[in-house]
Image (cartoon, coloured by chain):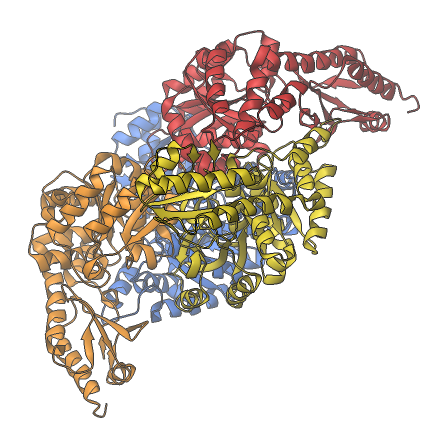
Chain colours: A blue, B orange, C yellow, D red
């Protein structure tokens, strides 16, 4: 049984589990007024090389919706890719937290927002016209929902276009660590140096226990989030247990090492499937997600061989590796799909 | 240093911490589709002697606001006590999740909603008049924000009045276990048998690691919550870690034993302060909260003696014990206040 | 039949009806981009002796809720009197338009907010604490819902206290013209000179055909309203017909003359009832509303004598005069109540 | 000067203006409890041959957003055409009134939603999945935003597909009268007999003075609207003046006669431009809107010749006729464009 249904089927990295236990003795003030949260802020500032504010939360949806709400008026619009998680798979959370802003989906190559598409949208947006939703934010999903990665210079170009028209830039970093590991750049290069104002850190899929965080480099965004998080029920009282996890997550580049492991497993799978007839990669495998198109029966056989993954419409499947996916798992996955493709008995 | 600032300054009970570690190996589907969550549902049904649905969440605010939103129209009104946490200390979360319903505060003896007050409010509410917010729910805080407890028959009388006019009944069980331990009744007697439709379980203050839950005995409320929780960012993907905690919380009546410990410490303090001059109990100490009124200098001295607690307006302080407060802590607390009262050197 | 159920049972003043017809010929751009709306802005600026922006709307509820939403964050709080229309009789419109802010009712003499009550509330509000709704606005109902009037100096004192803590000041001028006529002061003295930032003009009850308006003296509030009004469906496309009415409303002090007529009728009634046994004035009659307390049978008899008015809980009734109420009507009203009081045959 | 910028630049039809004056004498209860509103309900029931409820409002945006909010949960989705007014030109009003539902744009021939497109969207919508916005309503713009008309059988087919999956069907009848006049069918055939549950009547563009209305054939939708309208500030107190207009609007088929006049003018223009070089009709001219594509200079010259119309992106212009557009106006419009096209001096 190899479980590639999502990276969130994984458990908690041992170092992070240990950090939870270490944080337990004694008492600590609730709602983030504890020492762990203060240290987390300091630690993140070092990692990102910038003053920042951090709001630990328990889900990527919360991180995204709260971040976008902090930069988007109720009559605002958020540009995102048409495949973006914030648009398709969060039950309208951003619409809820903003009080009814619009998500306007854009298109582009490799499931990334294209700069021309963004610029056309901005040109026809109707800034200042009261009958039009007013563009307030650009949301980039990193990695994209098809596992491709924006290079820092791509982020920078899109962010610059957005900033020119007064939009804030949000990065949904659900797989930020995987993206950093893939691109091999500094966290700062991928974020604030490229123009990102507010970031969903995206730690849960990569080894924490529902410990995620909003990171913002802008004090005015932070000021809003203080109230928005509380009002949203997103300030767990024993915050120290989130913060302690995130400290461990950053320690000794654990986050990047965990992500590199997941990426490696995915690259082994992608390489192994290159010459398998009947299977086609839908997108380049930049991080830890593999999207395949192929015949139903191939996938049905692979399932019988114990491979767990999700079906998508239009003959597509998604496989996601995590820090728990070993190289042996990856090879077994390849083998299962290869055998299924050749039609041999399961 | 004795920390009585809140029960949420405490850590995680050892049995619950162990449960987290036990849940870690292997993979599990996210968002509640795991075995732990299924078992939690079964376990809670046994404990409450009723079919129910459970939605693990990470804060009491989330539990309260989502519960109330599931039973209150946007143009609705929720009756609560004027001291209720949902009204005063959750940054308008219920207003947010309902889309702008009104919280209408009521009064009564011992910081509980009085039946006459509720009935007058219902009589003058203007049911059916489009200019008036329409009463949709009654929210009872158990224990109250002054540490008093509604007896099951009090809950039943208030709930019956509410149900007669079509209102749903919510219990904010932030200190439900403490209340059950105090009253020595079955969970069912305090909840659905008394008319409660939806319940904030309130586990965090009593030993879990930000694992709280909404419990509802009504399938139609559950149907709403499925979407409301997701949309609110309140479905942590690695849900098993919340559910595993809550299973351990219920195992062998751990929740009641932890609560009884906190209650005992509070009763020791209350008893010990009875004859201390200059200090007055603001409310009966039914559970684990003690509210005192007294001279500023007494409290200032007690603080210098290492007692940690919160000041409130109008010469009042609040002390809260938890499952971590030992009898020795309780006695030391009494001693610190007694000495401060007599004006001896700190 | 004398109809004192409300001032909104009245029709449209003839001068205003004529203005509607005059505005009809030709074409005009929609949504406020017409000449009438531009002229209205100029005219109002002269009347109020201040630069301002005006947003014609069709109901007092819209004017109030939009005004308050423009100055109140979703996690904000609005102080109002506990009898305020915005709190009790607008179906939670302000909560809706703000996205779930709280209305916090205050008390005071003569149904006006008291300065000490406001100051205590501000002192205990918890500015900056994320668990507390943050006070954003003070809303004054002028005249109050019991027909009493804030003097300019009272407005100024309350507004100063609010401004000191960063709150905006809104006046629900549902009966502003009546209040101006009563106090005999300039519009500016009652509004911006006293600290009012945004105003519901309140023309409908005083002779227009559902032509009301928001007036604001602050450009940043106006900037918000441009979008909030449109998004709320509150920018009627043929705006010229609202603006033309309001121009006529202000012409030659028509608004003050209409209001004075209503006030006079009410004062005749109040004076006439002074010595009627069994009837007690609930509040001073400053403008065009009379609140009486008395025996049910008196009111029942008065109804049989053809007097139309509204019952209120607790043996109270409300009579409201309008610009259409003649002095003869007023005398007939007195006569009907006097006869009913003495128990003679209806 | 021929003003074809919109049909809402027109004034009020004389019969309707007369009705306003007739409604003025005497007093009438506010908020729709008057005789005019009762008669309007009866009259509409006759015209539509069905029991119904009517809510007069003052803008099409209000009618649309309130209607859709009454049938759409906050986590819901509304299908509309990608060119729909509700999606593009109402400042997110539907998102606001629903509390953050999504508008999901669909495509199709002639700017109408295509049945296959709707069916694919429904098939992939993810009904019951909590991460997906749940389809609640289909909104049809009649006539479309490019002036094409859904035939009753097209409405019926789309509505049937929507109803099969539990969606409600809304018609934005901003130009319903024009559509009825074009198709020459009964109001019932275009609405409830074809499956429409709730309707924006769309009277303003066709001769009323900001008197529009929501009409619903379903009592449960009406029950919601009673509160939603009030809460939205959309219950003008002197409602009789809206209702009186709408009664006159329906009297002796005035609405259809006014619409037929506008349609006729548009058809004269469309016919006259058929052979003009350099101008291309973007869509069939079913009602009173003409969309042309052509060279910038042609349009610039036409403007100099006194023709008023709106530019659209991508070399497109829109001309809209109204009941006030005479046949002479139409011919003059043709002449202006023809001369501009041939490049002669303006």
Viewer-proximal residue among D217 and B232: D217
In the rendered image, the quadrant that contains the C terminus of chain B is bottom left
| Above or below, comparing residue C341 to residue D280 in the picture | below
- Write down the quadrant of residue A273 in the picture: top left
> Left or right of D177: which side holds D340?
right
Total numbered circles: 0
| Above or below, comparing residue A222 to residue C143 in the picture | below
Q: Which residue is pictured at 42% across the width and 69% down the height? A: C123
Q: Position of residue C322 (x, y in %)?
A: 54, 40
Viewer-proximal residue among B133 and C16: C16
Q: Position of residue C22 (x, y in %)?
A: 73, 30
Q: Residue furthest bottom?
A: B345
In the rendered image, the quadrant that contains the N terminus of chain B is bottom left
Viewer-proximal residue among D326 and D319: D326
> Left or right of A176: which side holds B205?
left
Q: Is residue A276 visible?
A: no
Q: Residue furthest top?
A: D184
- Write down the quadrant of residue A115 in the picture: top right
- Write down the quadrant of residue A147 in the picture: top left
Q: Residue furthest right?
A: D345
Q: Position of residue C155 (x, y in %)?
A: 54, 61
Q: Position of residue D1 (x, y in %)?
A: 82, 25
Q: Which residue is pictured at 16% across the width and 63% down the height? A: B14
> Left or right of B83: which side holds A171?
right
Q: Is residue A16 visible?
A: yes
Viewer-proximal residue among C52 and B202: C52
> Left or right of A37: which side holds D274?
right
| Above or below, comparing residue B292 to residue C76 in the picture | below
């Amino acid at each position: 049984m190899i479980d590639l249904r999502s990276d969130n089927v994984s458990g908690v990295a041992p170092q992070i589990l240990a950090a939870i236990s270490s944080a337990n003795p004694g008492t600590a003030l609730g709602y983030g007024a504890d020492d762990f949260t203060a240290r987390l802020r300091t630690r993140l500032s070092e990692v990102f090389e910038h003053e920042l504010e951090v709001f630990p939360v328990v889900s990527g949806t919360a991180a995204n919706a709260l971040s976008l709400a902090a930069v988007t008026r109720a009559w605002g619009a958020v540009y995102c890719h048409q495949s973006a998680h914030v648009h398709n798979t969060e039950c309208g959370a951003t619409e809820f937290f903003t009080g009814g802003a619009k998500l306007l989906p854009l298109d582009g190559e490799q499931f990334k927002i294209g700069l021309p598409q963004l610029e056309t949208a901005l040109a026809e947006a109707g800034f200042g016209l009261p009958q039009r939703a007013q563009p307030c934010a650009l949301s980039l999903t990193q990695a994209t929902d098809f596992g491709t990665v924006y290079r820092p210079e791509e982020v920078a170009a899109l962010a610059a276009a957005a900033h020119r028209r007064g939009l804030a830039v949000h990065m949904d970093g659900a797989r930020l660590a995987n993206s950093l590991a893939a691109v091999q750049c500094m966290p700062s290069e991928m974020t604030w140096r490229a123009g990102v104002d507010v970031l969903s850190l995206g730690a849960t899929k990569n080894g924490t226990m529902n410990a995620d965080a909003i990171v913002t480099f802008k004090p005015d965004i932070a000021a809003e989030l203080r109230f928005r998080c509380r009002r949203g029920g997103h300030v767990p009282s024993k915050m120290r247990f989130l913060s302690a996890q995130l400290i461990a997550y950053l320690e000794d580049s654990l986050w990047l090492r965990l992500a590199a492991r997941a990426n490696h497993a995915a690259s082994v799978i992608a390489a192994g499937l290159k010459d398998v007839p009947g299977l086609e990669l839908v997108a380049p495998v930049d991080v830890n997600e593999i999207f395949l198109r192929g015949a139903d029966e191939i996938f049905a056989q692979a399932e019988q061989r114990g491979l767990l993954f999700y079906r998508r419409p239009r003959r597509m499947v998604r496989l996601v590796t995590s820090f728990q996916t070993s190289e042996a798992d990856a090879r077994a996955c390849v083998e299962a799909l290869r055998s299924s493709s050749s039609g041999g008995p399961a």
